[in-house]
């Protein structure tokens, strides 16, 4: 860093080749590649989604939660291709009053409802390419064992006591609420009823003897944990919010319900008259998956990244770490929080009839198209609004026109008749900018492009680390645009392969553009796996050349051999991404007010 700045002070004239390489990106073995040192690739990583309630069919918000986790996990695997080092779990949350009531309303036995809806989640995730290694259902026997063992760990440490709980309970959110978080709302017939201030869901008054967890003892340990781990909750504003919550009093928490009221759940060990609180039951899923209570779970815990929506932050950032500390374990390493999708400006809800069915979207926009849309448009810090025109516009402009068009411009037979990766000519594009000579053709903007694409993998990795996947995609899209500008500027279609003056430069232009496409294809794998596969296969990039560790961008520019030069491109398999017809892709009628 110091050396680079000194060289910058000295100016470009007479600067060594080393300084130029530093200016235009990392050196050869870092030119676009991420080394093992960058990402501690030998370490294990365990990613989780929340487990989904089975009271209703999945919607796009649920798919979004799973996609974020999928993209993070796939990106991690790209950094360290040993799949043994990553684990990725998802599943369904099947106990509790909410499910018990939903089954009763549907006239089904709870198991029937759970089987039906859990199957819908599994099918959706399979169709959407969610690459989970585990799918857990909380009604499985292994989970009951884990929850009861965990309960025993809390009990043996004196953290559970029996007491009278009196207060509001919200079955939809499965949570207890203090008086200050409840308001009265008028119904259609003029009567008023109590609802949760945060979610708007109805609440009811509960008074019963329960087991209570000594949550109040954990206020300071939680503050210490968060202050000592500023990256524990990402993005930062959510970390801040949790610390603010911890400034307030932290009352003890009721962790069981009377079985006569809640029978659909796991009984308290040794006391069948009580059922374990569904959130305690649900959170333990993260341990069940990795083998708890068997000691094998320790090889995955706490190397855990929980991906969650903002509505369940308190459960994951306060209750869960407190339970874990109470049971003698460490809190999870990272909690990534995202915001919600609204539809045409409104919260998605069955009663409003605006729930967007993710399977319809996957059919209409293709799996890769819809994955790209949700991850490119979804901003973790704020809610995002969904409507169909937005999907069509984005996919047509970024995938069909910009990326597909770029590939077509460089690989089509009319421009690249030999259908090979052409040679890069160092006389036309010397590694030192500003040189003049008869064969030098590269311009300042071309060096800017090389610099941007060389640093792109690191930039993308940083965005993934900060849970800003949309920014990673924005950065890739910006470079695609820049590469199209490069091709447009040099108009290879106006150059002639037969001319000894044109040919080396024509080959170089195509070589650079193909190298850029190789970087884009590699970096898009976590988000659009099939489209990236199609792109990389067309470029002739083999499966073993697709990891981030193998991504040596434009080695000829840096004075090294390029394994692709002269290689035949892969077979032509049609357009990369078919352009969508606005009128035929209607899922949600946009009736904005
Ligand atoms: N069962 C609990 C989680 C237990 S985890 C130990 C639960 N389930 S849920 O089905 O209601 O929500 C699952 C996830 O979907 C949550 O992360 C939630 O934030 C997310 N979403 C629900 N609606 C959403 C949107 N409209 N938009 C984005 N994500 C949304 O909570």
Image (tube, rainbow, N blue to C red):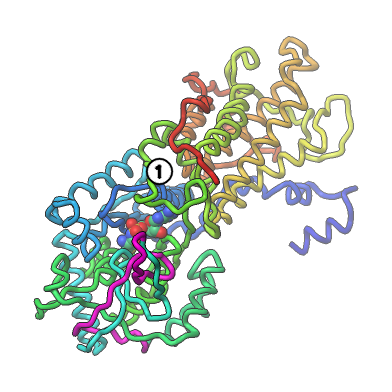
What residue is disc 1 on? Answer: 356
Q: Is mark 1 within 8 Å of ligand 1?
A: no
Q: Label 1 crowding class (10 Å Cα cut-off): few <14, some 14-19, many 20+?
A: many
What segment is highlighted magenta in the picture? Answer: 188-217
- Residue at the spot 73% in from the left edge and 51% down from the top edge: 22
Residue 527: x percent and y percent? 48, 43
- Residue at the spot 35% in from the left edge and 51% down from the top edge: 351
Is residue 165 shown in magenta?
Answer: no
Quarter residue 511 falls in? top right
Is residue 192 shown in magenta?
Answer: yes
- Is the N terminus in the top left, top right, bottom left or bottom right quadrant? bottom right
- Residue at the spot 40% in from the left edge and 65% down from the top edge: 200
Residue 514: x percent and y percent? 62, 29
Query: In the depicted view, which residue is nearer to us: 289 or 451?
Result: 289
- Residue at the spot 55% in from the left edge and 39% down from the top edge: 390
Query: In the current view of this chain or complex, which residue is farthest to the front?
Result: 190
């Amino acid at each position: 860093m110091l050396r680079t700045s000194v060289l910058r002070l000295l100016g470009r004239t007479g600067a060594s080749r080393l300084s130029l390489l530093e200016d235009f990106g990392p050196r050869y073995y870092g030119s676009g590649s991420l080394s093992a040192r960058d990402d501690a690739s030998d370490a294990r990583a365990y990613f989780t989604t929340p487990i989904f309630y089975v009271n209703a069919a999945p919607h796009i918000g649920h798919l979004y939660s799973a996609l974020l986790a999928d993209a993070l996990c796939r990106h991690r695997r790209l950094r360290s291709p040993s799949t043994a080092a990553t684990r990725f779990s998802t599943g369904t949350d099947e106990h509790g009053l909410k499910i018990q009531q939903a089954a009763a309303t549907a006239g089904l036995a709870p198991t029937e409802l759970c089987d039906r809806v859990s199957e819908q989640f599994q099918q959706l995730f399979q169709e959407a390419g969610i690459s989970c290694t585990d799918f857990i259902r909380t009604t499985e026997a292994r989970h009951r064992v884990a929850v009861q063992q965990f309960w025993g760990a809390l009990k043996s440490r004196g953290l559970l006591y029996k007491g009278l709980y009196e207060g509001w309970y919200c079955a939809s959110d499965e949570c207890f609420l203090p008086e200050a978080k409840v308001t009265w709302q008028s119904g259609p017939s003029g009567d008023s009823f109590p609802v949760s201030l945060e979610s708007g869901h109805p609440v009811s008054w509960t008074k019963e003897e329960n087991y209570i967890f000594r949550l109040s003892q954990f206020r300071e340990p939680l503050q210490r944990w968060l202050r000592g781990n500023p990256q524990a909750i990402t993005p930062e504003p959510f970390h801040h919010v949790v610390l603010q919550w911890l400034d307030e009093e932290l009352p003890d928490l009721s962790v069981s319900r009377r079985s006569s009221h809640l029978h659909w759940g796991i009984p308290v060990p040794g006391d069948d008259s009580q059922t374990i609180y569904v959130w305690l039951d649900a959170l333990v899923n993260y341990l069940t998956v990795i083998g708890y209570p068997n000691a094998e779970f320790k090889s995955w815990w706490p190397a855990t990244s929980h991906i969650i929506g903002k509505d369940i932050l308190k459960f994951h950032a306060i209750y869960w770490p407190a339970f874990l500390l109470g049971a003698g374990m460490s809190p999870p390493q990272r909690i990534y929080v995202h915001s919600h999708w609204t539809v045409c400006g409104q919260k998605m809800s069955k009663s409003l009839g605006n729930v967007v069915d993710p399977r319809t979207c996957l059919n209409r926009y293709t799996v890769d198209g819809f994955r790209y849309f949700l991850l490119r448009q979804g901003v973790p810090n704020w809610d995002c609004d969904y409507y169909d025109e937005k999907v069509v516009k984005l996919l047509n402009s970024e995938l069909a026109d910009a990326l597909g068009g770029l590939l077509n411009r460089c690989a089509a037979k009319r421009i690249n008749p030999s259908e090979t990766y052409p040679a890069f000519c160092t006389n036309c594009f010397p590694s030192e900018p500003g040189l003049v000579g008869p064969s030098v053709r590269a311009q300042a903007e071309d060096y800017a492009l090389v610099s941007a694409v060389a640093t792109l993998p690191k930039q993308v990795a940083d965005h993934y680390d900060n849970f800003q996947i949309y920014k990673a995609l924005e950065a890739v899209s910006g470079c695609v645009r820049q590469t199209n500008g490069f091709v447009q500027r040099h108009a290879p279609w106006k150059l002639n392969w037969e001319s000894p003056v044109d040919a080396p430069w024509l080959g170089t232009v195509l070589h650079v553009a193909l190298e850029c496409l190789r970087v884009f294809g590699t970096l898009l794998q976590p988000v659009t796996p099939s489209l990236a596969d199609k792109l990389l296969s067309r470029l002739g990039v083999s499966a073993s050349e697709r990891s981030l560790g193998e991504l040596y961008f434009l080695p000829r520019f840096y004075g090294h051999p390029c394994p692709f030069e002269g290689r035949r491109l892969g077979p032509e398999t049609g357009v990369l991404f078919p352009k969508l017809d606005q009128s035929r892709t209607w899922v949600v009628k946009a009736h904005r007010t």
